[in-house]
Image (tube, rainbow, N blue to C red):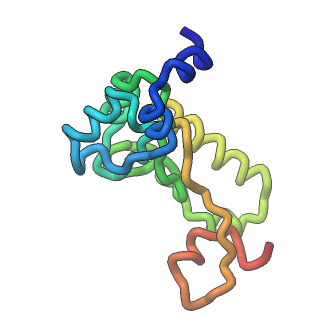
Amino acid sequence: MDLNSLLSSLSLKQKIGQMFMARDLKFFPDETMKMIEQGLIGGMHGRDNDTAEDIRAAQALSPVPMFMATDMESGFCGNNFGGTHFAFQMDLGAFNCKNTAYKFAEAGAREARAFGVNFVFGPVVDIANEPASPFINIRSLGSDS
């Protein structure tokens, strides 16, 4: 069945569910997996305690292809993912080199795909304009637009 046919066959409840992304497969595992199996969740935001196997199992269980997301501000390196840990955006911005930035993004994308992730939160486009905020500053490529 093609994607258009699949989507048109969904109930209203399932269509609404496709607009939601759950976070952390292990917080309510039984309830979450049941909702995924029923097509009531459109995506998962993988957290540090989720493994690549967890992500693949959830995707296989869903009747509709899901967005499988994770944070990647410093690479694909959650505790259980085992990917490469890159420098933060602040370090990348200091290089001021488009080629280096491209290679960073490409390597992260390849690792994410290998683990079943198809939606990435980060790198973000924060601007380091508040010196008192060290959290934003390390997530930013720089202090100007």
Q: Is residue 54 left or right of residue 64?
A: left
Q: Residue at x 47, y 32 (%)?
A: 12
Q: Is 60 located above or below residue 134 in the figure?
A: above
> Is residue 6 or residue 101 the one in the foreground?
6
Q: Residue at x 40, y 28 (%)?
A: 59
Residue 77: % across, % down? 43, 50
Q: Residue at x 58, y 18 (%)?
A: 3
User: Does residue 123 show up?
Assistant: yes
Q: Is residue 20 left or right of residue 3?
A: left
User: Does residue 115 show up?
Assistant: no
Q: How many marks?
A: 0
Q: Is 112 located above or below residue 132 in the figure?
A: above
Residue 145: % across, % down? 80, 72
> Quadrant location of the N terminus?
top right
> Is residue 38 or residue 94 the one in the foreground?
38
Residue 6: % across, % down? 53, 17
In the image as oriented, which residue stretches furthest toward the front? 12
